Image (cartoon, rainbow, N blue to C red):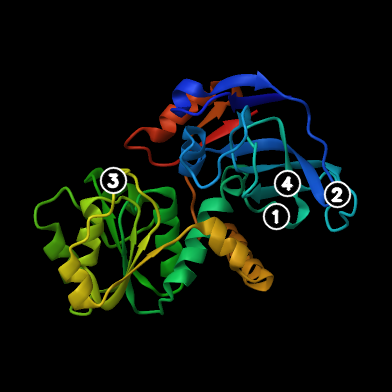
Amino acid sequence: MRSARHTRFGEPAQVLAAGEDALPTPAAGEVRIRTILTPIHNHDLWTIRGQYGYKPPLPAIGGSEGLGIIDALGDGVTDLQVGQRVAAASVHGTWAEAFIAPSRMVIPMPDSIADETAAQLIAMPLSALMLLEFLDVRAGQWIVQNTANGAVGKTLAMLAAARGVHVLNLVRRDAGIEELAAVGVENVISTAQDGWQDKARAAMGDTGAVAAVDSVGGTASGDLVSLLADGGTLVSFGSMTGEPMQIPSGAVIFKQATVKGFWGSKVSQAMAVEDKRRLVGELLKRAAAGELRLPVEKIFPLEQAAEAAAASLASGRTGKILLRP
């Protein structure tokens, strides 16, 4: 089968190349999925760099989420069938004509959800929904997040709004305000504008945010802490800058703030099966109803994975980059 693979760790645009691999055979409890579309996530790129929590043996096929048609069942799989259109995330090697997924990780997709949405519906949106529950916020409360025009940021804002939670969305470019408005996200402030902190405080009122989500690191972490209410929580979700979080000790002490890390894979492993099913059911419902919109920037052929990775890293992107075998 054709694949997008790398034989060494490094910058994805430099190390990814088209290749051929043996068609995998599903073991007991697994299924093989013929790929329709597969997204490029930031954590996929960090994995290729060798700087993520999971480091694959080389050579490795990229990708961790995909949509496709089941074409083979492993022993003991009785709840799925050949020919079903399904999605799977938290798997490996999806940037290929076929990939293997444990049957418990496979989610049948209703016809009402388009391929472009279904291909990216599980990993980032489910992480956003798990993050929302991790924050333990109630309807009427405020949370604040940076990189709000990223995949998780957009999804978090939409899902929180559907639950009645207010979100203050910070973007680093003025153009990001219009990008989010186009998908129905409100309460957006550009940190490129003078006095943005005052605007942020005015938007939330005297109470401040009960929680903040940091996907940037560096001085941006301290900016978020300054917007927290007393006893608020700062959650580190990612580090776009790659810099250590810079947080004034005084703000942590006098606000009695808490700083936590969030890694979706770990949270997912610890989550009860019934809770995960409930969250996935909510995603499917909101996607089918049009309450959750997941735009696509461009679809690249599998052979252009290196170019697709570069496009995924480009600034000003307004949607997800997908690969089609």
Three-letter amino acid code of the residue under disc 3: Glu
Residue drawn where x is 47% and y is 70% of the image: 134
Residue 297 can be seen in this image:
no
Between 254 and 32, the residue placed more toward the observer is 254
The answer to whether marks 1 and 4 mark residues whose Cβ atoms lie closer than 8 Å is: yes
Mark 2–mark 1 Cα distance, whole angstroms, equals 14 Å
Residue drawn where x is 53% and y is 24% of the image: 16
The residue singled out by tag 4 in the image is 101
Left or right, 145 with respect to 229, comes to: right
Three-letter amino acid code of the residue under disc 1: Met
- Residue 97 locus on image (x, y percent): 70, 30
The residue singled out by tag 2 in the image is 28
Left or right, 199 with respect to 220, comes to: left
Mark sitting earlier along the chain (2/1): 2
Mark 1–mark 3 Cα distance, whole angstroms, equals 33 Å
Circle 3 — which element?
Answer: loop
